[in-house]
Amino acid sequence: MASLTPWHRLATRPAEPSARAEVRTICVIGAGPSGLVAAKHLRDVGYTVTVLERSSKVGGTFVHKAYDDARLVSSKYLTAFSDLRSPTTAADHMSLPEYVAYLEEYCDRQELWSLMRFGTEVLRVTRETVNGALVYNVETRASEAYPADAGGAAQAGEGRTRTAQFDAVCVCSGLHEVPYTPAIAGADSFDGVSLHSCEYKERSLFKGRRVLVLGCGETGMDLAYRAVHTAAATAISVKRGFLAVPYEGWGGVPLDTLIANLFEHCHEHWLLHALHVKWAVTTVFIRAGFWLTTGSSAGWDQWVGHVEQVKRGHHILCKSTAALPFMNRPAKRKTWRHRLWSWLDPPHKRVD
C-alpha cells in the first residue's frame, strides 16, 4: 500500500525528518460537528480512527451548552454537510435538538458510531520518539461530568486513567468549550447569583430578579431577551458596541442565503479585493437600507450600542435581535422620528 501520510496537509510537522513515520492511527478529540467530519474523511482515506468524546452524545456544545428555545443563526442550507442535506421538514434555522438529530443521522449514514468512545475525557497529549518514529500518547479517564450510556463504549472505572498511543491527533474540542470570565473588581463580594452564559439553561432562573447581562454577543442578546420577559428589571452592559443584523431577511428568507449569491461570489480582481472596494460600495447601500426600514444606519433597528465605524467585513455580526426593541426605547423616545418606525416595536405588554 502506498504511504497514507499526507505531510503537506498536516498542521504540525516533526522538526526532524528522521522522526517521520507512517501515520496509520489517528485520535480525534471531540464528537461535535468538526470531529464527526474529520473522523469520516480520515477513515475514508484509510486511517484507523478513534473518536474520544467526554459526554455520552454527539453534538458537543450544541448539547451541553444548549438553552431554552435556542436556534442556529446559520440556515440549514449553509449549515448542512456536503454529503447530507438537512431535512426538508426542519425549520430554516434549526432548533438545537433538530440539529443534534441531524448529526446523529449523519453518524448513521456514514457509519461512524463504531469509531467512538463516549464517556472518555482526554487529560493530556504528549509527544515522544519511539524507534525513530514520532508518536502521541493520549492520557484519558472515564468522564465524571458526563457518564456514558448505550450510545457508545465507555471506559470502565470512573476516574481510572489510561494511556493509548497514536500516530497523529486531530483536536476538535471546539472554540467554546472553555468559558472565559473576565476579572471584574469587586465581583468576589457580589452577594447575588453570578454565572457564565454557558451555565444558563432556562428563563425561570431570572424570575423576580434584577438582571445585568455583560456582553452583547448572540448568546448575551438571547439571554437579555429572555430576562426582559421574566426578571423584575433587566440591563445590558456593552463595552465596544456591536453590529446587529437579523438572521432572516425580507420575507423570512435566511440572511445567509441572500448573501450567498452570484454577485457576492463572482470573480473579483485581486486589487479590488485588497482595497475592499466591493465592501466599501455595498456598505453604503446596506446602511441606507437600514435607515429607510428601521430609522438607524448603525445596524438593523439598532438605535443603541453602535460601533465606531460601521463597515462591512470589519465586524462579527450579532444575529440575535429580539432584545433590540427594548434596548431602543430610551433612545427612540428622544426623537419624534421613532413614530415612523413604530411598527418594529413589539406588540405585547409594555416592558422597560
Image: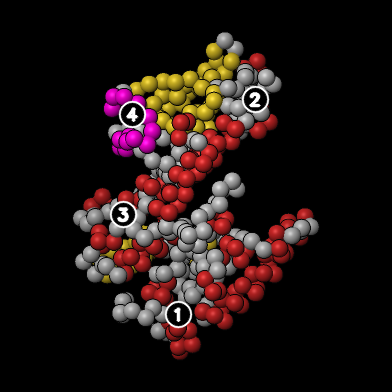
At mark 2, the secondary structure is loop
In the displayed orientation, state which residue is furthest to the top: 131
Visible in this render: residue 61? yes
Going from N to C along the chain, the mark reached first, 3 or 1, is: 3
Under mark 4, the amino acid is: Ala
Residues in magenta? Answer: 145-159
Identify the residue at horizontal 70%, vertical 69% (top origin): 281
The percent position of residue 338, horizontal first and vertical second, equals 45, 85
Taking 348 as reference, is 181 above or below it?
Answer: above
Distance (Cα) linking label 3 and label 2: 44 Å
Number of residues whose C-alpha sits closer than 10 Å to that of mark 4, classed few (under 14), some (14–19) or many (20 or more): many
Q: Name the residue tied to disc 1.
A: 344
The label nearer to you, 1 versus 4, is 4
Going from N to C along the chain, the mark reached first, 3 or 4, is: 4
Q: Name the residue tied to disc 3.
A: 201
The percent position of residue 79, horizontal first and vertical second, equals 54, 53
What label does residue 5 carry, if any? Answer: 2
Number of residues whose C-alpha sits closer than 10 Å to that of mark 3, classed few (under 14), some (14–19) or many (20 or more): some
Q: Which secondary structure class fits the magenta region best?
A: loop
